[in-house]
Amino acid sequence: MARMFFAWASMFVFVLAGCEGQKGSPVEEEKPIQEEEGKPREEEKPKPKVSITWIGHACFAIRSSEGFVIVTDPYSNIGYKNPNQYPDIVANAITVSHEHSDHNAVGFVNQVPGGAKVIRGSGEHLVDGIRIKGIGTYHDEVQGAQRGPNTVFVMDVDGIRICHLGDLGHLLSAAQLSEIGVVDVLMIPVGGVYTIDAAKATMVLEQIRPRIAIPMHYKTPSLSFSLDPVDKFLSGKEGVERPGTDTITLTPGELPDPVKIIVLDYRR
């Protein structure tokens, strides 16, 4: 009887010890999924950068994060160095707001092999995935009777909506504003004489309400004909910055609010 009790007791201790051993045994932890070597995580992907360079007058070079370059309103022989004298600027597309020689000198732009796509007039254009929309306006306040038509161009570049007003000569109608839509960056003429002057440019700025406004088409020491200087437009305004450069670089989702007016130096 004693031997039977001892056997049962020994079995109980053995089973209990086994259970304790299982309880304390290490469990293999689930290993996190490793990212592919050299491949950044989704949140680490670099954000696109868009650069805008003021070449002079109403001429800008807008460069996407992929290196696609849009040149606006190229000029020739107006005092500034001509756009083709800058080897770092090679156009994939060129917009022409109207047919005056200080805005349509397409041949004075370095172009990609085979030539750049030249865009004129109103309508929708798609060039290498970049949407460019032309909106019909006028070069004066009498529906083009004095200076003819003008095209406003709106471009969607890497999530940033850029509007170039060309030689706009009047306040915008409700229909034109609707076509332009929301604007992140606005290139606006402010020098008067041939376009809206400082007072009307201020009103157009209020009409469009961009995040960034870049004045253009005003008198500088290099320009060979007379316009009002930019300071006339800037007078009394807040949020004015002079970065001391011809180029700004922008990131979608990181634009200022309210509007910031950025005065660029022209290319020399």
Image (cartoon, rainbow, N blue to C red):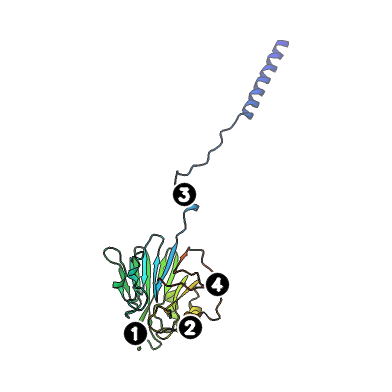
Which residue: 48% across, 51% down? 42
Q: Quadrant of residue 171?
A: bottom left
- The tag on residue 148 is 1
Q: CA distance from mark 3 to mark 4?
A: 34 Å
> In this orientation, which residue lies closer to the viewer: 91 or 79?
79
The answer to whether residue 40 of the structure is visible from this angle is yes
Q: 247 or 80, which is in the foreground? A: 80
Q: Which class describes the residues within 10 Å of circle 3: few (<14), some (14-19), or many (20+)?
A: few
Residue topped by disc 2: 198
Secondary structure at numbered mark 2: helix
User: Mark 1 vs mark 3: which is more N-terminal?
Assistant: 3
Q: Mark 4 and mark 1: span between their CA atoms?
A: 34 Å
The span from disc 2 to disc 3 (Cα, nearest Å) is 48 Å
Q: Earlier in the sequence, mark 3 or mark 4?
A: 3
Nearer the N terminus, badge 4 or badge 2? 2
Instruction: Identify the amino acid type marked 1.
Output: Gly
How dense is the environment of label 1, judged by Cα within 10 Å: few (below 14), some, or many (20 and up)? some
Q: Position of residue 152 (x, y in %)?
A: 39, 76
Is mark 2 in CB contact (under 8 Å) with mark 1?
Answer: no
Which labelled disc corresponds to residue 157? none
